[in-house]
Image (cartoon, rainbow, N blue to C red):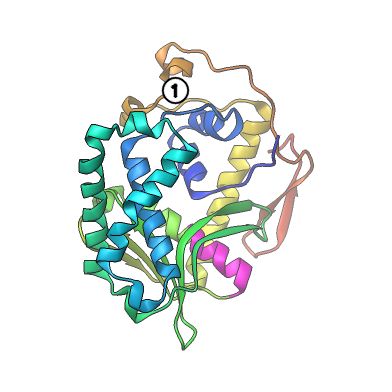
Amino acid sequence: MAQLALSPSRASDYQRCPLLYRLRAIDKIPEPTTLPQVKGTLVHAVLEEMHKKNRSERDFPRAVKKLKPLWAEMVNKDPELNELVPEEDLYDFLVECRSLLRGYFEMENPQGFDAERCEMYVSTTLPNGVPVRGFIDRVDIAPTGEVRVVDYKTGKKPLPRYSHDATFQMRFYALVYWRLHGVIPHQLRLMYLKVIDSMFLTPSKEELEFFERDLGDLWEKIVADGLSGTFRPRTSKLCGWCSHQSLCPAFGGTPPEYPGWPGPQQALPLATGDGAAAYTTNEDA
């Protein structure tokens, strides 16, 4: 079994429900693909393709024309998408995707700059021993050296009190980028294409160091559950949308037999307040 690493999605899973984390990250129980997921995947693919083109080719009509061929590629790779979006619903589905692309072009002129990287895969181990990985939608570097990390959102913009997952994700990628490249991004931008609105963050060194310590604490809890096999369920209003209720004790279900922790079986480094590393054994974790 492959070694685990922390990503924004898996961190959110554990904070929401440790059992959900286990079922997704360790057991890898299949889940049904949702319409919002495939819509987001298609729009992201179009924007990635567009930013690879010359500036003069980055316009709305050309972007819209990429929807059908990229959707055909997605269906070719996963024919079950035809069941999720049957032929009679395809037109309306593509119209919704076109509307999201229109939102992008109303927020930004892609002919005015060149993206440094799109769908940038990042993977490293933080100084406190936490393995991290993920994909950054886009990284821009200004001629003067400032770095901007951009993430596209195709759903609704959350109310401020529900924006934790979004800000967590952006701080996560800012931290990973900093640790990989030695540069703290000057701006983090979440582009909510559906509502044509953005959320901006400007991280500081102190903020990212504090966030890094939080990740260390979170990873310590995950490892402790992983070694003991505990991963207790945590109920909330979001349980109604969970596809794993049949495997959840909180709903009368039984989880599959625990396959064991796929992570390291040696001492785990933990960040201390002075930035040095302390260590705990697996038994202590």
Q: Quadrant of residue 57?
A: bottom left
Residue 205: x percent and y percent? Answer: 52, 72
Residue 255: x percent and y percent? Answer: 54, 17
Residue 108: x percent and y percent? Answer: 28, 71
Residue 115: x percent and y percent? Answer: 44, 73
Q: What is the three-letter code of the residue carrying label 1? A: His
Q: Tell me if residue 178 is in the magenta stretch.
A: yes
Q: Is residue 118 visible?
A: yes
Residue range highlighted in magenta: 172-182
* Residue at 77 percent of width and 38 percent of height: 265
Q: Residue furthest top?
A: 252
Looking at the image, residue 102 lies above or below residue 75: below
Q: Residue furthest right?
A: 266
| Quadrant of the snapshot with the N terminus | top right
Horizontal arrangement in the rendering, residue 100 relative to residue 50 (left or right): left
For disc 1, the marked residue is: 244
Element type at mark 1: loop
Horizontal arrangement in the rendering, residue 284 relative to residue 135 (left or right): right
Looking at the image, residue 131 lies above or below residue 1: below
In the foreground, 15 or 147: 147
In the foreground, 181 or 267: 181
| Quadrant of the snapshot with the C terminus | top right
Horizontal arrangement in the rendering, residue 116 relative to residue 33 (left or right): right
Q: Quadrant of residue 148?
A: bottom left
In the foreground, 167 or 157: 157
Question: Could you classify mark 1 by the number of other residues whose Cα lies within 10 Å: few (under 14), some (14-19), or many (20 or more)?
Answer: some
* Residue at 42 percent of width and 71 percent of height: 53
